[in-house]
């Protein structure tokens, strides 16, 4: 009986204590904890959300050399991150270079309010860095002038409330800022209190011209990552504790309204980054599914339980704070900082799954990258830099990175050269698509043959370059000088003689048809043959000058081009043009011919006329 009475007495005392703690007003933390919430159903881990272990090969970079690399930004080919202690660092190769600081000098991590704690950061087009610090507001860094300015102060009243947790931001092209205020009741070191209380997060718009702030979305349960769409027609903001993302329309018929972009994510999203195109990357800092719900989200439906837990922590922190006021100790400072800090509950997150969700511009889940390897934890940011994906965290002492190739991704921006000439060559001959350099040389003779009187030399010049580019470069370099004078008809048989007539015929076209233009067009074409633009210039003139010759040269060369392309293209031209032009042109062009074969014989010289042509 004594044991039962003792147990009942303990239960009654406990109930009374709980009721007093819950019902007595004005107990810390001083926040509203009255609402009950229900979360949308969490999406199952199948389809694009199925576990695939793609992130298991993530490299652990700079282990133990930095603390809490929360987010990333890139400018001028250099990577920047925010660190614990108020530091903004630049990552150059294997070096960590501090380039700025948001707060004041401090000694220990528990002096977070003094040090500052930069979270979100973005560069504008001019290289100005904007940083969101939960204790110091939104700051602007001009590294060229070594200047730091406060854009939005934490003392500024916005819609009747002061912001207390500046988190993330996005910079528009016109200089406006869109930023998230995660809470108007608690600082970052009291994040657990904010999770247990009613939501007060906001999405805010800063007008760069008027320098005024306007609340766009209110009552978000820990507003977090912010990003603008590629066309800046809407802005996204994360609601972390609700596992969803909101969309606010900036243009179009829905301008000024907002809706749910995506919800039911299998985890708590943090920062948002671009996928390099028009989609988004959303890392889930904490995993959630039907079998592994989080304690905080379970308690959303029980406001009195949340109030009790929050007040228990608040009373304990108040007690230590009172003792600290009379007798300051380092232990008391650490305890005050630890109670309510997100690090105090991080050991409770036992689910090993880490997930990065890839979203389309319409909010569709395209794919996900996951791992259950415990070496990678608490991913808050996924940033594409060059050919790798960098992973940040508010807790880790390292940066994760993985090559995009392992994600089966191509680089977000790919530049390709000379797409236009390829299309033009395809119109002339489909064979040019396989090997553009040699095949480009063969079609131009067909185009340039129509003007045999003045354009026959270019085909002869173009035919030899093709073999030179492929195989017989040495053969063409030796014979061209002796053969140009005597055997115009002989080029049909030996390829070396074919090299000689091209120089002979290069000179006559300019005097016969065009004194200034043909030399200008004929001298650059040999290099142009490799690049495909020259055929564009040479095709129109042959059509204007002669229509019949192209069929004459096109009929014989196809059989002859199969075995030795250079001799086959020259067999038809000697009867057509070689007899009259060589005698007239053989005397004057040798000097010019010598220069042309040398250009053709050496690939390096052919590249020089390309530059001229491009100029």
Image: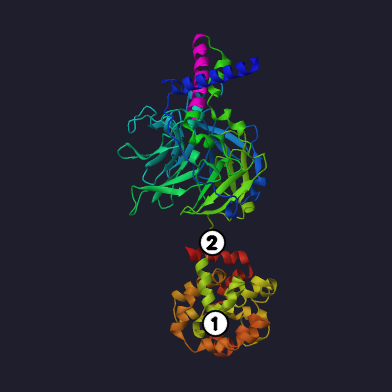
- Secondary element at tag 2: loop
Q: Nearer the viewer, residue 321 or 59?
A: 321
Distance of mark 1 from mark 2, alpha carbons?
28 Å
Residue displayed at 64% across by 76% down: 481
Q: Give x and y (percent) for residue 97.
A: 56, 34
Callout 2: few (<14), some (14-19), or many (20+) C-alpha neighbours within 10 Å? few
Report the number of discs: 2
Which portion, as a residue range, is magenta?
A: 306-326
**331 falls in the magenta region:** no
Q: Nearer the viewer, residue 31 or 136?
A: 31
Label placed on residue 124:
none
Q: Is residue 387 above or below residue 447?
A: above
Q: Which residue of the protein is positioned furthest toward the top in this rendering? A: 326
Q: Give x and y (percent) for residue 262.
A: 48, 49
Q: Is residue 548 above or below residue 458?
A: below
Apparent side of residue 481 relative to residue 201 in the rendered image (left or right): right
Residue displayed at 47% across by 87% down: 547
Mark 1 or 2 closer to N-term?
Answer: 2
Q: Which residue is mark 1?
A: 446
Q: Is residue 201 visible?
A: yes
Q: Give x and y (percent) for residue 215.
A: 35, 38
The image's colour scheme reads rainbow
Q: Most prominent secondary structure in the magenta stretch?
A: helix
- Secondary element at tag 1: helix
Corner quadrant of residue 606? bottom right
**322 falls in the magenta region:** yes
Q: Is residue 580 visible?
A: no
Q: Which residue is mark 2?
A: 416
Image quadrant where one finds the N terminus? top right
Q: Give x and y (percent) for residue 494.
A: 68, 83
Frontmost of labels 1 and 2 is 2
Callout 1: few (<14), some (14-19), or many (20+) C-alpha neighbours within 10 Å? many
């Amino acid at each position: 009986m004594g044991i039962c009475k003792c147990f009942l007495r303990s239960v009654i005392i406990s109930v009374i204590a709980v009721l007093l703690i819950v019902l007595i007003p004005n107990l810390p933390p001083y926040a509203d904890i009255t609402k009950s919430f229900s979360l949308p159903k969490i999406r199952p881990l199948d389809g694009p959300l199925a576990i695939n272990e793609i992130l298991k090969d993530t490299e652990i970079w700079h282990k133990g050399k930095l603390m809490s690399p929360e987010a990333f930004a890139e400018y001028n080919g250099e990577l920047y991150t925010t660190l614990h202690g108020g530091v903004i660092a630049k990552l150059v190769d294997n070096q960590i270079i501090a380039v700025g600081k948001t707060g004041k000098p401090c000694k220990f991590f528990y002096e977070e309010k003094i040090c500052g704690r930069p979270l979100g950061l973005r560069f504008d087009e001019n290289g100005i860095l904007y940083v969101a610090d939960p204790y110091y507001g939104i700051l602007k860094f001009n590294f060229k002038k070594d200047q730091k300015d406060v854009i939005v102060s934490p003392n500024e009243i916005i819609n009747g409330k002061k912001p207390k947790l500046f988190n993330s931001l996005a910079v528009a092209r016109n200089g406006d800022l869109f930023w998230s205020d995660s809470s108007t009741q608690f600082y970052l070191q009291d994040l657990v209190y904010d999770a247990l209380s009613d939501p007060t997060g906001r999405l805010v718009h800063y007008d760069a011209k008027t320098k005024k702030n306007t609340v766009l979305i209110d009552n978000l349960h820990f507003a977090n990552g912010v990003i603008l769409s590629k066309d800046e027609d809407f802005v996204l903001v994360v609601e972390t504790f609700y596992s969803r993302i909101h969309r606010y329309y900036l243009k179009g018929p829905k301008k000024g309204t907002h809706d749910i972009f995506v919800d039911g994510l299998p985890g708590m999203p943090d920062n948002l980054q671009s996928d390099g195109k028009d989609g988004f990357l959303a890392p889930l800092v904490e995993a959630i599914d039907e079998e592994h719900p989080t304690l905080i989200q379970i308690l959303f439906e029980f406001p009195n339980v949340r109030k009790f837990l929050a007040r228990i922590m608040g009373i304990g922190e108040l007690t230590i704070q009172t003792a600290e006021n009379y007798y300051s100790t380092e232990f008391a400072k650490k305890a005050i900082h630890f109670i309510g800090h997100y690090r105090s509950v991080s050991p409770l997150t036992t689910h090993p799954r880490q997930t990065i969700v890839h979203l389309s511009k319409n909010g569709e889940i395209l794919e996900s990258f996951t791992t259950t390897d415990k070496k990678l934890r608490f991913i808050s940011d996924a940033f594409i830099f060059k050919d790798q994906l960098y992973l940040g965290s508010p807790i880790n002492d390292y940066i994760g990175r993985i090559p995009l190739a392992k994600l089966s991704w191509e680089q977000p921006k790919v530049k390709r050269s000379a797409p236009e000439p390829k299309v033009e060559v395809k119109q002339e001959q489909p064979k040019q698509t396989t090997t553009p350099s040699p095949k480009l040389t063969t079609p131009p003779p067909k185009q340039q043959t129509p003007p045999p009187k003045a354009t026959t030399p270019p085909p002869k010049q173009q035919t030899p370059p093709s073999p030179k580019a492929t195989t017989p470069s040495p053969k063409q370099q030796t014979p061209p000088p002796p053969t140009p004078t005597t055997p115009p008809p002989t080029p049909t048989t030996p390829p070396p003689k074919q090299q000689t007539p091209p120089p002979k015929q290069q000179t006559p076209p300019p005097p016969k048809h065009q004194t200034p233009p043909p030399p200008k067009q004929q001298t650059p074409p040999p290099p142009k043959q490799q690049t495909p633009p020259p055929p564009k210039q040479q095709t129109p003139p042959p059509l204007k000058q002669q229509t019949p010759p192209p069929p004459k040269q096109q009929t014989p060369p196809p059989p002859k081009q199969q075995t030795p392309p250079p001799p086959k293209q020259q067999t038809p031209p000697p009867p057509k043009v070689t007899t009259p032009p060589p005698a007239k042109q053989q005397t004057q062009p040798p000097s010019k011919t010598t220069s042309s074969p040398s250009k053709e014989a050496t690939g390096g010289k052919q590249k020089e006329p390309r530059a001229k042509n491009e100029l």
